[in-house]
Amino acid sequence: MASTVNIMIPLLFAATGGLFTELAGMLNIALEGLLLIGAFSAAAAAWYTGSFAAGIAAGIAGSLILSAVLAVTALKLRSNIFIAGLAVNLFASGFTVILSHRLFGTRGVVVLKDLPALPKINPYVYSGWIFLFAAWLVLYRTPFGYRLRASALHAQALRSLGLRPGVYRLAALLVSGLACGIGGSFLSLNLGAFVPNISAGRGWIALVVIFLGGRKPLGLLAGAFIFGLAEAFSDYAQGVFAVPADFILAIPYIFTLAVMTGISVYAKRKRR
């Protein structure tokens, strides 16, 4: 159970951030790159300072900066957000390797020395739940949340009130950067090292979790837990069952696909 909870935490942060952009009418596929930049920034700061706090702050800052660049590109320059998000992912993948070589002299694993290990159930876990609850409050119990959701469905109504939908979309992208910065910092600080492409598809899975959870905060928690449980089982199964390792590693994705298919079939039958 502890492994499941730890696995789900970066997914929960990324999915919560992605929920803001999704409800603002933007499919943010840059979650993968934002997680990766957050993980690298946190690792670099922790390596130089030996401080968890500095690592978390740097992870948030790095991801926020990249999400701001995405926002300018998509909202100000009017580029296709899907293409811009893909560019962010490709940039993060290459840029972190280049910076790792420059800062640490290696394109491989960077071990964070002199950092104590995080406990199995650590502050990130509680922060993830608090962050999700705060997201629910903001999105469904505040005027800001109503307006953010209206920026996707009723943008013209917002304009008629003298409000700018772009401001709320910008806020949504920045929230996704904040969330991915925290989630990314967990990946490297919990491991005690930075590994190239440490995000390992979690940003993409976070997008699945958003739709798996019905674009609702409580659904996100359930979706992240389901994937975390499947991945924890695959980690356990590698040392227990005599089956090919490639199949075991695919278990979380097969399980997620099966659940998504089941939900889709159920939704179609319900509409009939």
Image (cartoon, rainbow, N blue to C red):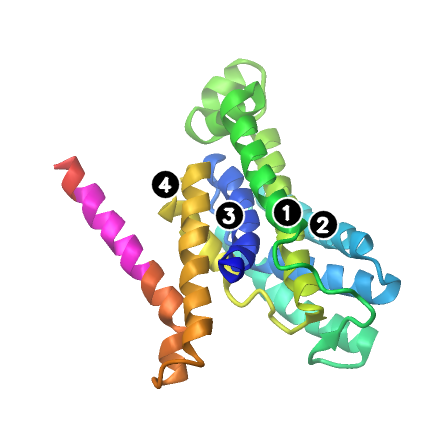
Q: Residue at x 63, y 64 (%)?
A: 91
Left or right: 175 in relation to 65: left
The answer to whether the residue labelled 2 contacts the one labelled 1, judged by CB atoms less than 8 Å apart, is yes
Dot 3 and dot 2 residues touching (CB under 8 Å): no
Seen in the image, is 243 located left or right of residue 221? left
Q: How far apart are marks 2 and 1 (CA)?
A: 7 Å
Quarter of the image containing the C terminus?
Answer: top left
- The picture places residue 246, in percent across and down from the top left corner, at 39, 81
Q: Is residue 6 magenta?
A: no
Callout 4: SS = loop
Q: Disc 1 marks which amino acid?
A: Gly
* Residue named by callout 2: 60
Badge 1 marks a residue whose secondary structure is helix
Residue type at numbered disc 4: Gly
Q: Mark 1 and mark 4 in contact (Cβ < 8 Å)?
A: no
Image point 46% across, 65% down: which residue?
232
Disc 4 or 3, which lies upstream in sequence?
A: 3
* Residue in the picture at 75% in, 75% down: 111
Q: Where is residue 234 in the image (x, y as percent from the top left)?
A: 42, 71
Element assignment for label 2:
helix
**In-image side of 38 versus 135 (left or right):** right
Q: Residues within 10 Å of mark 3 (few under 14, many from 20)?
A: many
Q: Residues within 10 Å of mark 1 (few under 14, many from 20)?
A: many
Q: Residue 214 carries which label?
A: 4
Q: Mark 3 points at which residue?
A: 15
Q: How far apart are marks 4 and 1 (CA)?
A: 22 Å
The disc, 3 or 1, on the residue closer to the chain's N-terminal end is: 3
Residue 177: assigned label: 1
Q: What stretch is highlighted in magenta?
A: 257-268
